[in-house]
Image: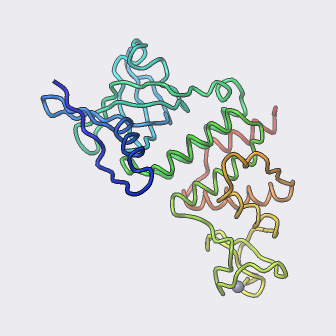
Amino acid sequence: MTVYEACPERVEGKGAAQHCRWTFLNSLSRVDMNTRISHKSPAIVLYCLDYGESDRIVTFYTSDFGKIKGIAKGARRSKKRFSNALESFSHGNVLFYKKGRGTLAFIEGFDIVDHYANIREELEKTLISSYLIELVDKFTPEGKKNAELFHLVRNFLGLINAENSLDVLIRFFEIRLLKVMGYEPVLDRCTMCKKPVNEKISYHFIVNDGGLRCNTCYQNNSSYLDVSLGTIKTLLLGKEIDMERITRIILSDQIAKESKNILVSLICHLIGKEIKSLHVLNEIREICI
Ligand SMILES: [Zn+2]
């Protein structure tokens, strides 16, 4: 006998019924008679590693449970349970159970939703998606839910798969990631005097402050990054613009360079080290893309 439990999340007002139905379908848990509770959640595969003769160790970022690491027994043999889809970037629904905190989950199944064929076939898209995945992995502890982050990764993988304006996608993903993780850079005012950005004043970006300093508050002995008004406006836009309009944005060379310096420097400062996949992307681009 199997019993299904709906997710207890409550939503009120218009759309509540539809949300509850969606939540039931997508987050329902299965309780077996031996009290083992299986969970189902939308998920993106971050990393996969072959283990033994037929198993795989898989790291997922799930919508309902955050980052989950687990073992998929027989994954390389069972098309039925895993659809041959346990590979980085795959989007689907994972079914798993876990015996306790800090232990590997047991992955019971994975239904594919999107395999992102273009990401797998085009080298630059593969490298950029690897960078996104590494950022998600570096910024998240296991087991902490952040549904907004899940939707961000899923939406950007979809855009990378479908579109060719790749640099603007990288930069806007970075700034949105910083925002949903609580590290949004301060770009609308000076971090010292708090005065709003004024078009008549020049600014510097101070990585240690996580934001701008106006010319008056800037001290010559601080290390800083150049930031023009155009870059400030572009990054502010990147945080809020609708997903379907992102690929209409074209970055000038100056804005692309300043945005990359600011966001990558801030991310490396927060993580405390270089991001390997970005290093690989930069090297490959210099050689052959
Ligand atoms: Zn100031």
101 sits to left or right of 203: left
Residue at figure coordinates x 38%, y 51% from the top left = 144
Task: Tell me where residue 98 sits by quadrant.
Answer: top left
Which of the pair 102/237 is nearer the observer? 237
Residue at figure coordinates x 71%, y 71% from the top left = 205
Task: Tell me where residue 196 sits by quadrant.
Answer: bottom right
Tell me which image quadrant ligand 1 sits in: bottom right
What is the x, y in percent for residue 170?
A: 69, 47
What is the x, y in percent for residue 278?
A: 66, 44
Q: In the rendered image of this protein, does residue 1 appear above or below residue 263?
A: above
What is the x, y in percent for residue 182?
A: 51, 63
In this orientation, does residue 65 appear?
Answer: no
Which of the pair 85/93 is nearer the observer? 93
Residue at figure coordinates x 68%, y 80% from the top left = 190
**How is the protein colored in the picture?**
rainbow
153 sits to left or right of 247: left
Quadrant of image for the N terminus: top left
The number of numbered badges drawn on the structure is 0
Residue at figure coordinates x 72%, y 27% from the top left = 122
What is the x, y in percent for residue 211?
A: 65, 72
Q: Residue furthest left?
A: 34
Quadrant of image for the C terminus: top right
In this orientation, does residue 23 appear?
Answer: yes
71 sits to left or right of 60: left
Q: In the rendered image of this protein, does residue 283 appear above or below residue 265?
A: above
138 sits to left or right of 23: right
